Amino acid sequence: MSQDAEAGRQEPSMQDQEPGEPGGFGDEISRMLHARALRHPDHADPIGMTRRHLRAAKGRRRTALGATATLVVAGGAAFGSGYVGLSHDNGTGTGAASGANGSAPDYSAAATCAANVKVPVDVPRGATTTTIAHALFEAGVVKSEDAYINAANHDQGSADIGAGTYVVCPGISGTNAVLELLKKSNLSDASQIIVQPHEWGKDVIAGLIDKRKWKQADFDTAIQNNTIGLPAWSKDSLTGQFTIEGMLEPGTYALVASDTPQSVLTQMVANRMTFLKSIDFETKAAALTCGTAHCTPEQVLTVGSIAEGEVTDPDDGQKVAEGVYTRLKDNDYLGIDSTALYWIGHLPNGKLPSAAQVQDPNNPYSTYAPHHGLPPTPVYDTSDDMIKSALTPSHQGTYYWCVTATGTEFFMKNQTSAFKNACTAK
């Protein structure tokens, strides 16, 4: 190539190149927006757009560039005539900041207001920054959606904002709105429920009814029709109906405006099933013997729930499980008070049931004569550890046990006298 030809050859400028070509306008914009998307996940990431898409935008880009040039010329007078800055409070304490150079309108007030002035803001599960911004704006908390979005994008902690209904002051800055949603104390009591081991599933439902004013009939329908993901084996052995007892995974659950009795129970059951599958529960349960046959998953879950109610030390769960399986094998009565209590219900002031109550022959959850075998369903929401204990009973000869002032005491089958002496019948 001659020097003249070399001199005449010029590298194409960014403006002249096709969008999407290496080094071109589209490529440069893509890199810029991609970097922005990495910093702010709510922005769309253009990486992966085809050249065809970018070429289709070529004409629009040229039109936009022309419009931009016009704005620059026309805008000269505006920039020369003055400066738009932050507005001051107008006496209400909620002055709006319009922002320089077109920044988002924002309040300047701090998050201080009387409790009766606060407003509810519902944050759905999986809500994006934009979704939360819209909810805050609609509730009158922030001056503009962008005020919150800008603040959230500058606060990495905003990613930790969880679902639920928050009660916050109206008319506050975007920055303060982020901080208020990060305070768990601002979650309304009705926006979460804690499922705890050693709790009855029916009590969990009662708590949900109290918090959300739902109807018992809606829970009953969801359970009976099994629209909540229960396994086929999670049934009452007497009625054959589905049961949630033992099938609600312990934990804290957020409650949002779109929730229903069905959706909440579905989440709790799904979490339980995830755990059970992680330990291969059904396969391991089938390897155990309940009486003269292989155990069903429901029976093993029931054994775990009995251990939940009988031990004071989690390490003793395997001993209780061994005692239950051994007595089932011997066709002996289990004689466990906690199972009967499920039917009796809560007694005042933590009072224990009497011998007559736990041995009531009309109580289907009684494990005294004439009731052989396990109760019809699990009797407690069972912790993960007690389920594992039911799958791995000890081999120490445990047959009897009782809770004493010093903890749970265990006895072998040939220690009947010692058992009776230590565990006086109530």
Image (tube, grey):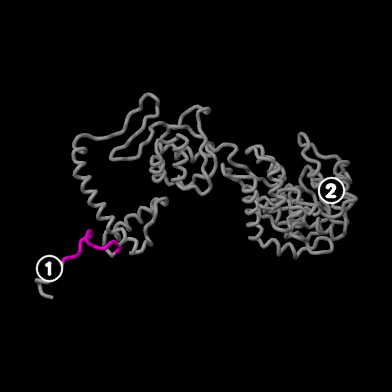
Disc 1 secondary structure class: helix
Left/right placement of residue 323 relative to residue 276 reads right
Q: Crowding near pointer 2: few (<14 within 10 Å), some, many (20+)?
A: some
Left/right placement of residue 145 relative to residue 78 reads right
Residue 419 is tagged as none
Query: Which percent across, then down, holds residue 40?
Result: 39, 50
Residue 198 is at least partly visible in this image: no
If you read the primary sequence from the N terminus, does the residue marked by circle 1 or circle 2 appear first? 1
Q: Distance from label 1 to label 2 (Cα)?
A: 99 Å
Judge by depth and name the residue closer to the eye, 247 or 292.
247
Judge by depth and name the residue closer to the eye, 36 or 303.
36
Question: For the magenta stretch, what is the residue range?
Answer: 10-20
- Name the dominant secondary structure of the magenta segment: loop
Eye-nearest disc, 1 or 2 = 1
Q: What amino acid is at disc 2?
A: Pro
Residue 364 is tagged as 2
Query: Which percent across, then down, holds residue 383?
Result: 68, 51
Query: Which percent across, then down, holds residue 27?
Result: 30, 60
